[in-house]
């Protein structure tokens, strides 16, 4: 059963962005899903498309033809040769495919280790596949299990708790220095991308007000509108700092825009209330000497990068723990698959035994009409107990641990011994 599960795709590890963008599909993913379903040999499928991966998860005949057809479909509009498609894609089957799905859901296969977005994207892909009846019992169980594995990893490890981007590291530091950020005021000097991202993170933490100061007032107004904030000229920076709790500076100016001597009178005006200064400009915008003043906490991009690297190291440590959980859950899922494969045989064996028991009981009771109802019930119970005892060891023989191939041989052997594949005339058949 496990060998029918396969995964085929392209991600940031196997292909550069110029290759990945050739495989971009429309946002709703409907047409790819419908077309993959129609590929001969495909029983179940789910289609996942994000900026860093395009992936098909399927339950299909183990033959190479189905996988090749899925790959051809994925690369059909790319202009790449089949050899290039093989080069830039990955393919997993069986336990490797199961392990991969769990790793994707837990963000162990993401560009940013531990990022939470991929789980939501996978849930959306699963929901779409269900809506279009592309999933069956195996993918339903596998994808549902992948969500619980991701949740378990979030609960039992700290893989998502530390900041691994410059912008989020800035927010993490702000919370350490200022405590609760609700209602605080942030001043953006310049309009760099990282400053914008930091402001977005800060807004998510409940920042009360955003002020954007920029050399080009038009740009300041546009960005301030995006954050429902205020715009100011860069020349207003120093007086504006009297009210700010956080300054994020990324002007790209050739010289310093804020010096130590500028800030000393401002701190007196603020009654020395703490202020957090983040300098993510290269060259630097803010005078390193500002750190000498009490209650001023200045961090430049190197300081933030250091936080990020420490946090990445922490995430990698947590990832090792997460990988152990994935391995454990993969093993459990394989056991479920094996039991799913055994279930029809065990059911059939019990049905066949029960039919024989019922027939022999009827014959016996017919030959002993003098038995009382209580004695008839005792004979019936003896027959049931005997069948259960006789079937106990054969069923345990099927369920015993071992390699999948050995379990399959055991299954075929038991079916042969008990004649489960024989037709009405006693001729063997499958």
Image: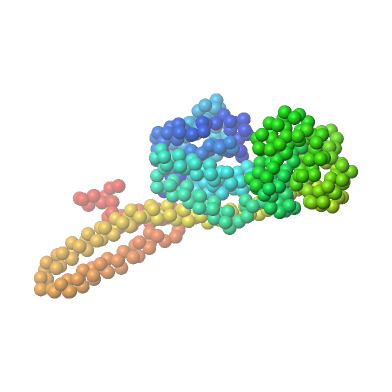
* Side (left or right) of 180 relative to 426: right
For the residue pair 106 and 166, the one nearer the viewer reads as 166
Q: Residue at x 72, y 39 (%)?
A: 211
Q: Is residue 113 above or below residue 218?
A: below
Question: Is residue 304 in view?
Answer: no
Colouring chosen for the image of the structure: rainbow
How many discs appear? 0
Residue 341, image x, y percentages: 38, 52
Q: Is residue 283 above or below residue 358?
A: above
Q: Residue at x 23, y 70 (%)?
A: 381
Q: Residue at x 45, y 31 (%)?
A: 31
Residue 193, image x, y percentages: 70, 36
For the residue pair 268 and 162, the one nearer the viewer reads as 268
* Side (left or right) of 349 relative to 59: left
**Residue that extends furthest to the top in the rendered view of this protein:** 79
Residue 389, image x, y percentages: 30, 68
**Residue that extends furthest to the right in the rendered view of this protein:** 261
* Side (left or right) of 204 relative to 371: right
Q: Residue at x 56, y 43 (%)?
A: 118
For the residue pair 396 and 149, the one nearer the viewer reads as 149
For the residue pair 269 and 124, the one nearer the viewer reads as 269
Residue 141, image x, y percentages: 44, 49
Question: Is residue 354 in view?
Answer: yes
């Amino acid at each position: 059963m496990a060998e029918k599960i396969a995964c085929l795709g392209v991600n940031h590890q196997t292909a550069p962005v110029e290759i990945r963008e050739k495989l971009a599909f429309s946002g709703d993913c409907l047409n790819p899903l419908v077309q993959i379903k129609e590929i001969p040999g495909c029983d179940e499928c789910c289609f996942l498309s994000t900026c860093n991966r395009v992936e098909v998860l399927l339950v299909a005949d183990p033959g190479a033809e189905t996988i090749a057809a899925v790959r051809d479909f994925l690369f059909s509009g790319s202009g790449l040769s089949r050899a290039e498609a093989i080069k830039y894609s990955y393919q997993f089957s069986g336990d490797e495919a199961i392990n991969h799905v769990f790793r994707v859901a837990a963000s162990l296969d993401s560009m940013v280790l531990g990022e939470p977005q991929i789980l939501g994207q996978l849930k959306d892909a699963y929901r779409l596949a269900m809506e279009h009846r592309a999933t069956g019992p195996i993918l339903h169980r596998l994808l549902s299990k992948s969500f619980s594995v991701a949740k378990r990893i979030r609960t039992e490890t700290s893989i998502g708790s530390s900041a691994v981007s410059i912008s989020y590291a800035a927010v993490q530091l702000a919370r350490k220095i200022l405590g609760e950020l609700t209602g605080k005021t942030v001043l953006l000097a310049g309009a760099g991308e990282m400053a914008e991202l930091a402001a977005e993170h800060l807004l998510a933490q409940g920042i009360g007000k955003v002020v954007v100061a920029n050399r080009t007032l038009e740009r300041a107004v546009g960005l301030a509108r995006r954050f429902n904030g205020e715009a100011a000229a860069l020349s207003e920076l120093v007086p504006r700092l009297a009210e700010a709790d956080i300054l994020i500076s990324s002007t790209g100016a050739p010289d310093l825009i804020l010096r130590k001597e500028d800030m000393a009178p401002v701190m007196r005006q603020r009654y020395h209330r703490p202020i957090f200064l983040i300098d993510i400009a290269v060259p630097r915008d803010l005078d390193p000497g500002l750190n000498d003043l009490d209650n001023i906490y200045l961090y430049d991009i190197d300081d933030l990068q250091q936080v990020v690297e420490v946090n990445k190291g922490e995430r990698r440590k947590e990832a090792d723990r997460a990988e152990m959980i994935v391995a454990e859950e993969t093993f459990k899922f394989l056991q479920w698959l094996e039991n799913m494969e055994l279930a029809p045989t065990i059911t059939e064996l019990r049905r066949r035994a029960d039919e024989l028991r019922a027939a022999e009981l009827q014959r016996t009771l017919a030959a002993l009409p003098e038995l009382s109802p209580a004695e008839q019930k005792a004979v019936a119970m003896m027959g049931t107990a005997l069948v259960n005892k006789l079937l106990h060891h054969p069923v345990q023989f099927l369920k015993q641990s071992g390699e999948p191939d050995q379990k399959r041989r055991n299954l075929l052997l038991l079916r042969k011994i008990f004649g489960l594949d024989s037709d009405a005339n006693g001729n063997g058949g499958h």
